[in-house]
Amino acid sequence: MKILEDYKKIARELLFEVDDEKIIKYKDEDGESKEMKAGSAKTMPDEHPAKQAYNKMKDDGGDDKEKPSGQKIGGSDFDRDSGDDSDKDSDSGDGEKSAKSDNEDINGELEDLVISSKQKFRYFDVEKSQEGHAVVRGDVKDDLDQQMSVAAVEDGDGISYVINMGRGSEGTPINFDSKEEAMEAAKKLLDDETIRDTMNGDGDPKHTVLADLDQHAKNVLLPDDHPDKPIPADPSYMWRTGKELDKKNESFLKEQLERIGGGKY
């Protein structure tokens, strides 16, 4: 009998391994309801509430106790006939489910970014829009033109990915071909001090909002060696960073340095 029980235990662990795509629901330290994919949750530290919720689900046999429809999962769920209507519903919604899944991933990654860099993102938070898109907010919480959104959107050709610099009427979308490209760009934009200061209400000049920085955002995303990459307005840039200046702008900057320094460059 002991051998049989051991076999059942092993079979249960194999059968009910939590799928990486499964959504883990948990509450953060402020008591707010959050969601994260199991694949991300299981990589969190043991004290992270998402990891704790993941472990509990695994202990319960891979069951979060509720199906999305509100019905309990029973043995019949594993014995459905291939012609079951629920399978048809699942197939018909693949595009929508993929976009929803990507939006969950995006939301989780941005939350982790903000949480992991508290000093840099002291006044920042991440929330979901009504459409399920990730919205990053600075200290100015209620102005849509000060909010950045990162979204996976289903279109006629599949799924497209877009970052909106401002969610109000003045916002500008920047499009990407993949979730990975969009996330890399979002992290690069949020790493930019000008963008963070503006989202916190410290734009220069005064009253500048995130939606005004569409061209600045595109410049931030250009590779450093791109011919259209603008040189910073501050002539001391080269001294502070050690980076060489673009040849086509060298004469202009020499003049500026001579004017400011009172001597030859």
Image (cartoon, rainbow, N blue to C red):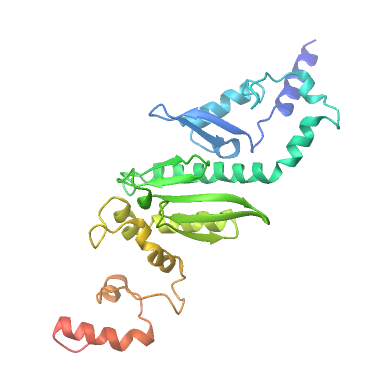
Q: Position of residue 224 (x, y in %)?
A: 43, 72
Residue 242 in the image: above or below residue 13: below
Q: Is residue 138 left or right of residue 99?
A: left
Q: Residue at x 57, y 50 (%)?
A: 152
What residue is drawn where x is 74% and y is 36%? 90
Give the number of marks.
0
Furthest residue in direction front, as rendered: 169
Q: Quadrant of residue 218?
A: bottom left
Q: Is residue 251 above or below residue 1?
A: below
Which of the image's four quarters has the C terminus? bottom left
Left or right: residue 256 compared with residue 156:
left
Q: Position of residue 232 (x, y in %)?
A: 31, 73
Where is the N terminus found, in terms of image quarters? Answer: top right
Q: Is residue 207 left or right of residue 44?
A: left
> Is 16 rendered above or below residue 147?
above
- Classify residue 244 as left or right of residue 228: left
Q: Nearer the viewer, residue 203 or 109?
A: 203
Q: Give residue 61's position: percent from left, percent from top.
A: 67, 22
In the foreground, 164 or 187: 164
Q: Residue furthest top?
A: 1
Quadrant of the rendered structure where residue 253 is?
A: bottom left
Residue that appears at 60% across and 24% down: 57
Q: Position of residue 78 (x, y in %)?
A: 79, 25
- Residue drawn at (56%, 55%) of the image: 161
